[in-house]
Every structure is written in C-alpha cells, then in structure tokens.
Amino acid sequence: MEPDRTTLRFSTNLAALRGIAAAMVVIFHALLVFRLTGFDEPHRQALSAIDSPWEWLVIILLGLTNGHAAVIIFFVLSGVVLTLSYERQRGHGLARLMAYYIKRGARLWPLLATVAIFAFILRDPVGQLHEPAAFTSWVNAYFSTDPGRNVLLRNILGLDSSLNYPAWTIYVEIAASIVFPLLFLASRHRGLTLAALAATIIVTALGWNYRGFGQYMVCFMAGVALIRYGEPVARRVLSWPRTVRIALLAASWVAILSVERLLSPHTHMYPFTVLVFTLCATIIVTHLTFAAPIVALSRKPLQWLGEVSYGVYLLHFPVLITLAMISAPLLEPLLSLGQGGALTANLLLAVAAFAVTLPLAAVSYRLLERPCQDIGRLIAERVAKRSPSHRDSGTPVHTMREPAE
C-alpha cells in the first residue's frame, strides 16, 4: 500500500522516535553513575571482560538504551527536519539563507546557553558533595578541573561541553546547520546527492573527524537523501508483507543497539560503528517518514515527550549529576550491598532524573524554547520579505506539517 503524501507528518512517527531517543540517553547516562565494584566505565567494557550476572545485566541495559546510537538517530532526524524546513523557507538568495540561519539559531542556541549557565551555577556547590569512591571514572572526570569564565563562554557558544557532556552533539548540530545549505543545493540533483553521500561515507570510513563533526556529516546527508529520494524505496518496502517489514525494522533496531558492543566497545564512535548506526537509523527513519501514522507512536505521552525532547536531552545531565551527589550519602547502605546495590541505585537515579527533568523540560519549552522559536520565525519572515523575489523557492517535497526544528 502506498503512503498518502498528504497525511505524512513529522509530528507523529518521527516526533515519537525523537522522544524515545532522548529517553534512551537519560537512562544510558544514569547507568554510568555509581560504580559497580570492580566494573568501572561499563560502556567501554568488552564482552570478554564481564565476570558476573550483575555486569551482564548492566551490559544488556546499556545495549537497550544505547545513548551513542540515539545520538546518530538525532543526527539523521536533523537532516530530515532541516531539509523540510529549508524547502519551505520563504525568500530568495541571501535573504533566504539568512532567514534559515536565524530560525536555526533561535532553535538551538537559547536553551544551550541557558543550560550551560545552569550547569555552571550548580557545579561548585554540587562538587563539594562529590565523593569519588562511589562513582565511575566517567563521573569523576567531570569534577577533575575547575571551569573558569572562559570555559563558561565556550560552553554558551557551543564550543565546549565540559559543563554539560551531552552538549557536544549540539556543536555538531551547529556545524552541520552552517554547511547544510550546501548539502541542500547538492540534493536538488540526484547525481550530486549520490556524490555528496558517497563523499561523507568515505570521510567517516577514513576517520577524518574535522573539528569533531566531520565524521557525522554522513548522518545529516542521509537525512537529506531520504527526504529527497527515499519515497520510491519506501513505497516498495511498504508494499512488502507486514511480517517482513517488521523483521527489517527489528533487525535494524537490534543492530543499532548491539554493533558498538560487539565491534568497538573501547572506542567512542568508531568510524565503522558510525556508518552502521547511520545505515540502521536511516532504514528506521525512512520507514517512519513515509509510513502512515503508527497508532502506538501517536499516543499523547510519546508526542509530548518528542515535543520537549531537546530540553530533556540538554537538561538531564546537570540534573543527573546534582541528584547523584545529593543522594549518594542516602544510598550508601544500598551501595554497600555490592554490584546489585549499585545497579539498583543507578536505576533509582534514572527514575529520579526523569521526575525532575521532565517538568523542567516542559517549563523550558513553554517559557524559553517556543517563544524564542516564534521570535526567530517572525524575524526570519521579515528578512525573507526583503529578497528580490518574495516567494517560496524550490519544489515542495511533501505536504507534511512544518516540524519543530
């Protein structure tokens, strides 16, 4: 059955996927906080180094909530969103380009800067509660240096993530957003699209990670290509029997959650792993983009989580660290029970982090993100009107509702 182009909407299937990915990152990070006796940094442990049932359970949970895979899903989704947004951007020439940058800046920067300041304010009082023995090296590294004002400024600008670890991906988003118009122009010709996609694959395979974002451009280019030219492939796949399609999606999901553990457990975002992540994420995102809205993903809680996912993603880390430092003395009896106690403490911490982060994300969305996006759109529209020819440029790809950028 062919998808109905008039009913494809980012706000259902893909918004839910974005919310699920954000939740995965929160749980993944919570599992890395309290140290299991003799088992430090579990996200970097090979399967051959696992000695106990508790360690196996941690590895399974880390696989099910693979934060690194979730990040690649975010990047592919960003390629989709940026393509849809730029396609609809009014104006022409330089005015259109400036309007796009204004909207993108209004989307990414206000919350990034606010959370950087929030984390900076919390860091000193929280650091005084820090007892290294209870925590993993991943947590202890956070308190290993004293940030100065220059570090705060770099975090506010997105050039540093020492105050908020997950913010490294926003630097990648900013860099990709800057060069995205070139990717968009290339995507208007099938040959150039294939060439650009091949070039980004080669760059990633060779491990050329220019200024920390080079190897991830393939994710954004995959998102561009699937919107531009993915519909015929999606139509063919959607015509397959339902069991076959489910098997394909399940295989992609299993691969994206397990390949890092099997192939490159000691290396953060190993090039081959990034390519496998990107392929699997593209398969999943392409299916969800062109398929009819899936009932399970259309539930209001998932849609709401997708709506506030940017806030969840950025806010959860300072919340997690603060709760960990405050709760460590209270959880000492539990931690003294060994590996099982430490794992239980991490799971309780995940629940507490969600309980605090979700309301904060909701407030930030209503009072900061949404107003800033509205202002950005208003300014962008005024800039676009100054173009020599005030009209939509480019050929519309779909009739999807404009997604949150």
Image (tube, rainbow, N blue to C red):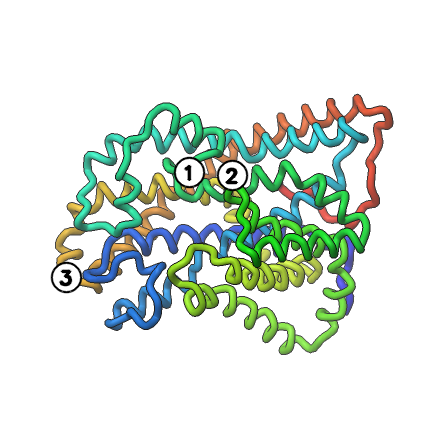
Q: Nearer the viewer, residue 363 or 338?
A: 338
Q: Quadrant of the C terminus?
A: top right
Q: Nearer the viewer, residue 10 or 24?
A: 24
For label 1, count other residues whose C-alpha is less than 10 Å away and answer few (under 14), some (14-19) or many (20+).
many
Q: In the image, what residue occupies the spot 83% across and 37% down?
A: 393
Residue 178 vs 217, above or below: the answer is above
Determine contact: label 2, label 1, CB under 8 Å: yes
Q: Quadrant of the N terminus?
A: bottom right
Q: In the image, what residue occupies the spot 34% across and 46% down?
A: 353
Q: Is residue 194 left or right of residue 22?
A: right
Q: Nearer the viewer, residue 283 or 333?
A: 283
Determine contact: label 3, label 2, CB under 8 Å: no
In the rendering, which numbered label is found on residue 293?
none
Q: Amino acid at mark 2?
A: Tyr
Q: Amino acid at mark 3?
A: Leu
> Which-is-in-front pick, marks 1 and 3?
1
Q: In the image, what residue occupies the spot 76% across and 49% down?
A: 187
Question: Which residue is denoted by mark 3 in the rendering?
Answer: 337
Question: Which residue is denoted by mark 2 in the rendering?
Answer: 171
Q: Amino acid at mark 1?
A: Ser
Question: Which residue is denoted by mark 1 in the rendering?
Answer: 161
Q: Position of residue 389 (x, y in %)?
A: 86, 27
Q: How many marks?
A: 3
For label 2, count other residues whose C-alpha is less than 10 Å away and answer few (under 14), some (14-19) or many (20+).
many
Q: Is residue 299 visible?
A: no
